[in-house]
Image: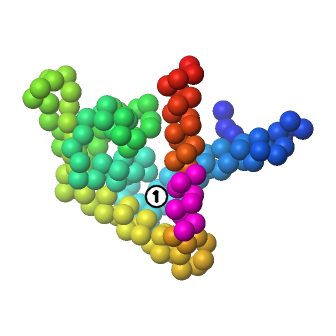
Amino acid sequence: MSMHAPLATPAQTGFLGAYLESLSMVERLHRLLLDVIKDEFERLGILDINAVQALLLFNIGENEVTAGELKSRGYYQGSNVSYNLKKLVDMGYMHHQRCEIDRRSVRVRLTEKGRNVRKTVDQLFLRHAEGLERQGVMDADGVDRMNHSLKRIERFWTDQIRYIY
């Protein structure tokens, strides 16, 4: 179910209406971020990797992690993390190795090819940050305030999952 342009009822004005608008905006921004990454990779002629996979490589960085850690550390939210990890290993973007302690667990880390993708995404984000600031879209204080608010919502939602349900 998409939250794009929800129809407001009289009860959805004020704070509730603004909250629903924020939820819709978060969803749209995430989809738009994936489109921006996809377009960058198409422009560079890198067609064997999708935006979700590129973002996953960016978030892993220099870490060596398991699939479970990707979710618990907040690097990856998708339900198909194992599929994407397998594809990235098969395409040469990641190394994988069985964990010595728990043989069922596999640890992954970026290859040189994966680090190149990470660098491409990093450069894209750097250009965006510079453009946002240069064009007066948002300054450092605005980003800090936005991050503070988003972290508070994240904490609230996490508490809802842990303690209410």
Where residue 75 appears, x then y in whole percent?
38, 44
* Number of numbered discs on residues: 1
Could you classify mark 1 by the number of other residues whose Cα lies within 10 Å: few (under 14), some (14-19), or many (20 or more)? many
Vertical arrangement, residue 98 with respect to residue 151, above or below: above
Horizontal arrangement in the rendering, residue 136 relative to residue 40 (left or right): right
- Tell me if residue 76 is in the magenta stretch: no
Residue 161 visible in the shown view = yes
Vertical arrangement, residue 144 with respect to residue 78, above or below: below
Within the image, what quadrant is residue 89 found in? top left
Where residue 92 appears, x then y in whole percent?
22, 47
Vertical arrangement, residue 40 with respect to residue 1, above or below: below
Q: 10 or 92, which is in the foreground?
A: 10
Q: Residue furthest bottom?
A: 134
Main SS type for the magenta part?
A: helix
Horizontal arrangement in the rendering, residue 119 relative to residue 4 (left or right): left
Helix, strand or loop at disc 1?
Answer: helix
User: Mark 1 sits on what residue?
Assistant: 37
Where residue 42 appears, x then y in whole percent?
44, 61
Residues in magenta, as a range: 141-149
Q: Quadrant of the N terminus?
A: top right
Q: Quadrant of the C terminus?
A: top right
Report the residue at 58% width, 66% height from top: 142
Q: 91 or 117, which is in the foreground?
A: 117
Report the residue at 43% width, 46% height from top: 52
Q: 36 or 103, which is in the foreground?
A: 103
Where residue 81 appears, x then y in whole percent?
37, 34
Report the residue at 51% width, 33% height from top: 158
Q: Amino acid at mark 1?
A: Ile
- Tell me if residue 144 is in the magenta stretch: yes
